[in-house]
Image (tube, rainbow, N blue to C red):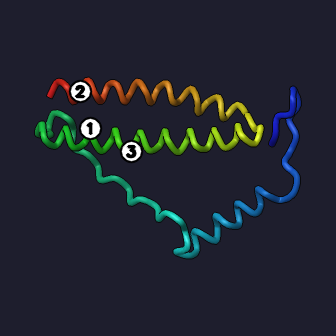
Amino acid sequence: MKRTNSRITRNSGNAGARRRMASRECARTTACATPPAPPPAPRKPLRAMTPEETRAWIQGTRSALEQKQAREWAYLDHRAHRGIHTLTDDAYEQDHQLEDDLLAMLGELEAHL
């Protein structure tokens, strides 16, 4: 859907249907650009980790969170370039504030190891 001035209009054509079909095709074949990541192993409680394990967990979590933010910003920038903005875009932007806070907390936690 596109926001044009104060009204929202649907995109013309079957772009959504084409994306869904491509997504389904990707799920059935190995032709995907990036294979899905395996699910993360359950982590031990922080109090049961050694400082080295905690540092490694912090670094991995920070990296994954930064990659997530980069994907979301690229998505939002692409939509903004096309003139599309919805309430979901606002929610993503608000999520980034929480994610920035979590990244800062991870840095503080690492500094205290």
- 10 Å neighbourhood of mark 2: few (<14), some, or many (≥20)? few
Give the Cα separation between the discs numbered 3 and 1. Answer: 10 Å
The reply, left or right, for residue 51 in relation to residue 89 is left
Q: Which residue is mark 3?
A: 64
Most distant residue in the front direction: 81
- Outermost residue to the bottom: 29
Amino acid type shown at disc 3: Ala
Q: Mark 3: few, some, or many residues within 10 Å (few <14, many ≥20)? A: few
What amino acid is labelled 2 in the image? Leu
Q: Quadrant of residue 53?
A: top left
What's the distance in space between the residues labelled 2 and 1, CA to CA? 8 Å
Disc 3, SS:
helix
In depth, the one of 15 and 45 nearer the eye is 15
The alpha-carbon separation of the residues under discs 2 and 3 comes to 17 Å
Determine which residue is flagged by label 2: 109
Question: Which amino acid type is marked by label 1?
Answer: Ile
Q: Residue at x 75, y 63 (%)?
A: 18
Residue 24 drawn at (x, y percent): 64, 67
Question: At numbered mark 1, what does the secondary structure look like: helix, strand or loop?
Answer: helix
